Image (cartoon, rainbow, N blue to C red):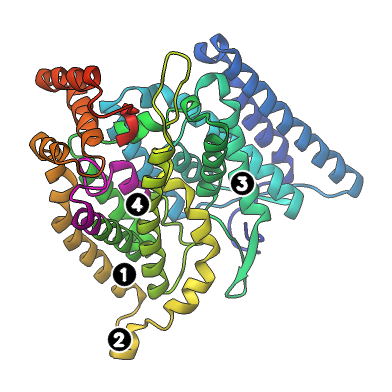
Amino acid sequence: MSAPSSSAERMLPTRAAVPVIGGFFALFFGFLALPRVRATPGLFWAFIGAGLVMLLAVGALALRDRRSGRRLQIQLWPKREHTVQLVVQLTIFGYWGWYWRPVYEQMPLILAQVVFAYLVDLVLAWRRYGRWRLGLGQFPITFSTNLFMWFRDPLFGFQFAMMALAYLSRDALVWRREGQRTHIFNPSAFGLAIASVTLIIGEWAHQTYGSQIALSLGYPPFAFEWIFLCGVVVQLFFRVTLVTFSAAMAAWVFGAVFYLKTGVWLYVDTAIPIAVFLGMNLLVTDPVSSPRSNGGKVLFGVLYGVAVCVLYGVLRDLGRPATETDPGLHVSWLDKLLFLPVLNLLARPLDAIGRHLNFKRFGWKFGPPATNRVHVALWVGAFVALRPWLIDHPGRSHDFWREACTEGRFRACENLLLLYDKSCESGIGAACHNLGVMVETGEAGPVDLPRAA
């Protein structure tokens, strides 16, 4: 969080602070009236606890200012970039939710997190600056988090904790880049990464809807195309196209090399899973916490694409199937969340290296806006070439995996079982029969069926 500057944005009268803050608290506690919240003790007490913590923090700051004679200033701070992000993310939720209705059912709780984010941001800005910038920035951070992880209702307090961590990292974990005080970590990614590590260590992944989210993002018939178009809209405003482009290309190349070495595909039926593709377009692309040079962006994206592929294999090996007494462990869906904070820490050295990869040395004369449009055009062409590998991948063939299983190739029988399971969920009777036969005979060994996410 950079220090507020003396800008021309509208300052609200100081007397407006009490009704504005009171309005946000009224909104937050108003969610207690939802039947779902009232019916679930974990949800109810999560709201009570989070609200009381915010009330105590605001009360302490008000008492401090009363003693010092200061008054909180509230500055209306509309930013076009936040509006663009908000609209893009809403379209993702809208399209996804049309084909997976739990998204719409979750929206009240997501909006409650937005209100909570406003309160956390208020407390941190008031404490540090005595001034609060009131805009739409809380929506993108909250929505970005909820595109990847929801805690189940009995443990919903962890959802609020994840949001608080995102804002605490933005406020406290900072450095100076090009003379400006900026946050080191992508706020959403930081909260998600800490939650991911906690889920792995505690073996609590089953207490989230993470694996269901990773799978259901692919339910809409044109999910890849929709996410791609939303990503392009963001890229036209933020000049982060090279990050997405290089991440996707690196993942595709990694998968191709994996096939050449093992004779099977890394991901069962696609070159890039839909949730990973979403992360490449709308999570990894925070312009503040990523490199600013074009060369640095390419290196950043390549490292992300390779890291996700490596982590998928590692996390898949950590998993175990559920039994009657054990919920199992399924954490491969965390692959796109774990490494991003590490990359954020590498942003400055990657920038230093990337500045040596400057095309201006070879006569490139276009300015940043025109160069970004060239990058977008390059990414559009790459996506057209990549699209068949996303939606019509050779790994979707049961015959391919049956042959690979017969030949004893790496994980082939396990992947065939996963493919049968996915096809069975789509209503293909023959796949259900074959799935039952494989499970009954133990042909693929003990397998955690959701591990294809």
Q: Which residue is mark 3?
A: 167
- Dot placed on the residue nearer the N-terminal end, 1 or 4: 4
Q: Position of residue 228 (x, y in %)?
A: 25, 50
> For numbered disc 1, what is the local secondary structure?
helix
Looking at the image, tell me whether mark 4 or mark 3 is earlier in sequence order.
3
Residue that badge 4 annotates: 309
Q: CA distance from mark 4 to mark 3?
A: 29 Å
Horizontal side of 348 relative to 120 (left or right) equals: left
Numbered circle sitting on residue 365: 2
Residue at point 62% right, 35% down?
161
- Whether 332 is among the magenta residues is no
Q: Residues within 10 Å of mark 2 (few under 14, many from 20)?
A: few
Q: Give the CA separation, mark 1 to mark 4.
A: 27 Å
> Residue 444's image quarter?
top left
Q: Is residue 116 above or below residue 45?
A: below
Say which residue appears at 45% left-offset and 70% top-offset.
292
